[in-house]
Image (tube, grey):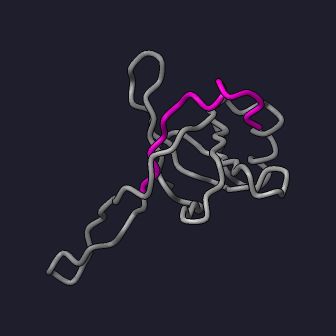
Amino acid sequence: MAGQIGDMRWRVTLYNAERVDDGAGGFARSDGVEATRSASIRPATPREVSAAAKLEQRLTHVVTIRWESTLIVRQGQRIRWQDRGARIREAYVEAVQDQGEDGRFWVLYVREGGPL
């Protein structure tokens, strides 16, 4: 949970993967920007990693963003952020949870690396 205002200091961009006809009977992947939001990002705890492994998912980070009615977040979306070392980090959403079930924050369980 984003406990203090300073926790939401990261800017993350969420992308939607879209299939675009390539004109030869196949498709090309096009990633459109869904939204850019402030977020809290932390490494996943060993307990969270273990729980994800039981569901055959890999988990590296936990990202918390504010809930918004116009924003759709779902499994498979790609997110990007810039870390303290000015490196662009990229991860894929494995699961989404309404934290506290009060509609204020979404918790995204993500993994770094390419799509599986």
Left or right, 110 with respect to 85, comes to right
Q: Which residue ends up furthest to the top in the rendered image?
A: 85
How many numbered discs, if any?
Answer: 0
The image shows residue 43, relative to residue 13, as above or below, that is above
- Residue under the image location 63 percent in, 36 percent down: 60
Residue 88 position in % (x across, y down): 39, 30
Residue nearer the viewer, 76 or 50:
76
User: For residue 98, which quarter of the picture?
Assistant: bottom right
Q: Which residue ends up furthest to the left in the rendered image?
A: 23
- Residue under the image location 51 percent in, 44 percent down: 37
Quadrant in which the N terminus appears? top right
Residue 114 seen in the figure? no
Q: Residue 98 magenta-drawn?
A: no
Residue 82 position in % (x across, y down): 43, 28
Residue nearer the viewer, 54 or 40:
40
The image shows residue 83, relative to residue 65, as above or below, that is above
User: For residue 73, which quarter of the picture?
Assistant: bottom right
Residue 6 seen in the figure? yes
Residue 108 position in % (x across, y down): 65, 48
The image shows residue 3, relative to residue 106, as above or below, that is above
Which residues, given as a range, are shown in magenta? Answer: 1-15
Residue 20 position in % (x across, y down): 27, 73
- Residue under the image location 63 percent in, 45 percent down: 65
- Residue under the image location 38 percent in, 20 percent down: 86
